[in-house]
Image: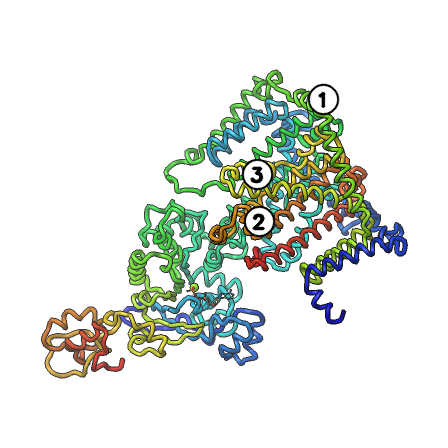
Amino acid sequence: MNTAAPALLRDGRAIWALALGASILFAWATRDLVPWAHEYPRDWIWPIRFEITDFMKWLINDASFGLFSFTDLTRSIAWLLDWPLGLATGLLSTGLMQGQGSDAVQITPPLSWLAVIGAVVAMGHYARDWKLAALVGGCFLYLAMFGQWNSAMITLSSIVVAVPIGVAGGLLLGIVAYRSPWFERAIKPVLDLMQTVPVFAYLVPILFMFGFGPVAAMAATIIYAMPPMVRVTMLALRSVADEIVDFGRMVGCTRRQLTWKVLVPASMPLLMVGVNQVIMLSLNMVIIASMIGAGGLGFDVLAALRRLDIGGGLEAGIAIVVLAVALDRLSQAFATRPPPVHEDPARGWIARHPWLVVALGWIVVTGLAGLVMPGIQAYPKALQVTTGTFWASLVEAINVNFYDALEAVKTAMLLGVLIPFKRFLIGLPWAVVVGLLAVAGWRLGGWRLSLLAGGLALLVVITGQWEKAMITVYLCGISVLIATAIGVPVGIAAAERERLGGVVRAVIDTLQTLPSFVYLMPVVMLFRVGDFSAMIAVVVYALAPAVRYTAHGIRQIDPQLIEAGIAAGCTRRQMLWKIKLPLALPEIMLGINQTIMLALSMLVITALVGTRDLGQEVYIALTKADTGRGIVAGLSVAFIAIIADRLIAAGSMRMRHRLGLAAEGATA
Amino acid sequence: MDDGVRVENRPVKLACRGVWKLFGADADGFLARYGHAPDNAAIAAAGLIGAVRDANIEVRQGEIFIIMGLSGSGKSTLVRCLSRLIESTAGEILFEGRDLLKAGEAEMIEIRRRKMGMVFQHFALLPHMTVLGNVAFPLEVQGVDRSRREARAREVIELVGLQGREGYYPRELSGGQQQRVGIARSLAVEPELWFLDEPFSALDPLIRREMQDEFLRLQQMLRKTIVFITHDFDEAIRLADRIAIMKDGRIIQIGSPEELVTAPATEYVAEFTRDIPRAKVLSAASVMLPPGGDYAGQVSADAKIAAIAAQVEAADRPFAVVGPDGAVVGRIDRETVIAVLVGRDPAGRAAP
Ligand SMILES: Nc1ncnc2c1ncn2[C@@H]1O[C@H](COP(=O)(O)OP(=O)(O)OP(=O)(O)O)[C@@H](O)[C@H]1O
Ligand SMILES: [Mg+2]
């Protein structure tokens, strides 16, 4: 052993074999010897979840900062969010009101559907061209025609308020982080954590602090949508050319002038990318936040899900898709708007802002006309089309004709794959899994990674989340496997065929703009509730990065290497297996990593269709407003995400080094 | 006001003494440990980058002082130290006699606003502003009101010949035009000290020449004190009153173009000056023979050979070389001029 061991330790495969062998032996031999290593004893659980709940109770009931109490603080935040939200809802949906509750009287009606459509058409043309104007105009017209207008406007008013706050907050934090390395070091891990904690977990403490209602939903939305803006801001400010920064300092800018007159305007195009992200994340969250009181389209979907009203749910779901597409295309067009060109200074303000003038005029004209003609104010009921019954009958038709087939597929998958895999994972002794994770961390990234992976896993164990965590891992694992099995070949095909690549990209882009909630409807419609439905939704949602990264990985291979392969007389198959795939592997691994992250975030949402994992735990905590329970389960999901992320990133990095590829992002 | 006063006799505007800039961890401590005189080996061994090593220069009022060296020799770093865009690791920087390194943040902002201007290699124009906005920007920062700053901006825009383009965005201009904007912008505040970091390097050769002429024309009018960086020796001799040559962070020689050509301090400098058309650099005084005999005419002692070559060559007798006071200080003949023109060492070269 003494001489053989170091050599053995250096050989990666030997270590894996050794570790696996030892684990199997351990699992088989020690069932009765050390039962605590198999099943974590109940009385050893660290009751942190109750401690958190107690702390939250204390915060709400007793905490005080001298002059004001914690509740005062949350109340004033609520007030700050409430009045702009009221204003936006008034403008878009209810009309501006005077007075409270049921005594309120309408002072002005809301913007009419024609006014809103006119405004978005003008924005579309201003931001790009008539094609975009027609697209967004069409999207909004769809909302009006299919009876989704009011819900859509409520959702839109949340976004109209949440986005500026999220952008401003993210911008400010990003600027502070840019200026102060100390703050950057502090905020980075927080941002990492915020992006891995599942969305539901945010909702629990916020629900507890703000109570059920649109304001709580707004707070959750802002918190959820802000982190990417912080990141984008740091990145954008750093990307301003050094010379420009030097110039700013040389003309004697104060720090404030340097920030607001030089850095921020000079990095505007990149910052706009951040704004687009904030908009899309806000939409996603506003929909989910219907669980804590946001109204609008999300609420319609949720209510339909609860009633199992497939027709109504699909209708609202499609409306969300339409709204998402319109917002995404519009904000992207603003982000990539061609930079300004010189204009004739002799022309007046009106001549230089034709679109603004036309849109304002349109709003006034339609507003006045709406006072006399109700059909202009609100889309005429008689002309509305409802697709609810159509969807309901379609689903019924599918069920009548394909019920047996669908059911057979579902049952076969459940019995053949899902349940055995679940049993296997749950049967693993926790001690073995934690140990294996630690070994993997050590092999891939040294003792730090080993401590991180083992430590986080152990935390999941001692907070009593192990079994639920394993169910999460099982569902996530299966879904990721399937998503990879579909996504990688599609990615390869997309990379090799130009036309197909374009189509795939368009589909993937659209899939990624859709709020996660939307994926639930069709799945439930076809397969009803359960693990299988959850799995399908997760696979579809998480597919995009597997495709995208694979295609990118294959495309970025040095053409010389391909030519070398052709020169050596490789067949197509050999090219793929011996040259392309190995070289693209690090990139593909990053894609799979992203797929895992998306799968975890979606998995939590599938709690709505009846899974039994950590997501369900968070969901239950949400319905009971049990903060401790929600946070502990939410953090457990985040820990799983972090372990997977760090292990895969380290593995991908090692592979890059071995292939002699530049370590991407190592210089950042 | 400087007209007629020789450069050596004008007051020193900007000086630096013993300036070091080392990049890397604990550069201060390292420099102190080595008594402010580490050698190259020690710097390399400590894993530091010696971007500027012990720089000493004096820039006099109204002169064009050129810092010249190959890429990576530390020119930009030196200028960034001089303008305090970065803090030097050690040394003293005197601007109009006071130590810049002791100036606080507010004072530094004030000095930069009123007294310094800078032109950048890649123009550093603000992409979101028009030409007018860019040129007025330094004044905007100072809080000058809109109508005054735009009036001033129009003046300098006209000075660099860009009138009619005020409403254009930088992207809509050619490289040469963009750099004109950069120049106009740095002149808007009427700086006394003007830094130009390779202002013409990003331009193609024809435009570069045009801009050099433009620059000389402006300097004729404005008489700024200029620190100009270039890696192009042709450019340096065309524009410079004096040139400092840098290599690996050290200044290895400072002198007029003529001094560098006639008395290179090291082999490195000689290498630089080898391909230079000497007739454009050497003056009559540096190649003249002792006075004597009769003369075909007179040339001034500081006239460049290129300027008098045709005249001297056409005559069958030598020309008298006369000093600033009108006295004959030497003679110059046809052989000497031809020797300079073909790049041979003229036989009777006098020490400068
Ligand atoms: N911030 C920095 N950190 C570390 N090294 C630096 C830094 N800035 C410059 N250097 C190094 O200092 C040396 C001098 O750089 P500098 O930019 O002053 O050269 P230069 O003479 O201006 O070259 P160029 O003609 O390419 O502009 C180079 O070796 C460079 O790599
Ligand atoms: Mg430089």
> Chain ID for label 3?
A
- Quadrant of the rendered image containing residue B253: bottom left
Q: Position of residue B94 (x, y in %)?
A: 45, 72
Say whether marks 1 and 3 touch (CB < 8 Å). Answer: no
Query: Do pointers 1 and 3 mark residues of a single chain?
Result: yes
Circle 3 sits in a helix, a strand or a loop, which is it?
A: helix
Q: Position of residue A532 (x, y in %)?
A: 73, 36
Say whether marks 2 and 3 touch (CB < 8 Å). Answer: no
Tell me which numbered mark, 1 or 3, is placed earlier along the sequence: 1
**On the image, numbered disc 3 is attached to which residue?**
A509
Circle 2 sits in a helix, a strand or a loop, which is it?
A: helix
**On the image, numbered disc 1 is attached to which residue?**
A400
For marks 1 and 3, give the one nearer the viewer. Answer: 1
Viewport quadrant of the N terminus of chain A? bottom right
Q: What is the CA distance from the residue labelled 2 to the residue labelled 1?
A: 44 Å
Residue at left offset 47%, top offset 59%:
A246
Tell me which numbered mark, 2 or 1, is placed earlier along the sequence: 1
Q: Residues within 10 Å of mark 2 (few under 14, many from 20)?
A: few
Q: What is the CA distance from the residue labelled 1 to the residue labelled 3?
A: 34 Å
Compared across the picture, whether A124 is left or right of A547 comes to: left
Tell me which numbered mark, 2 or 3, is placed earlier along the sequence: 3
Q: Residues within 10 Å of mark 1 (few under 14, many from 20)?
A: few
**On the image, numbered disc 2 is attached to which residue?**
A577
Say which of A494 and B319 sits in front: A494
Q: Is mark 2 within 8 Å of ligand 1?
A: no
Q: How many marks?
A: 3
Q: What is the CA distance from the residue labelled 2 to the residue labelled 3?
A: 28 Å
Q: Is mark 3 within 8 Å of ligand 1?
A: no
Amino acid at pointer 3: Asp
The answer to whether residue A138 is above or below residue A165 is above
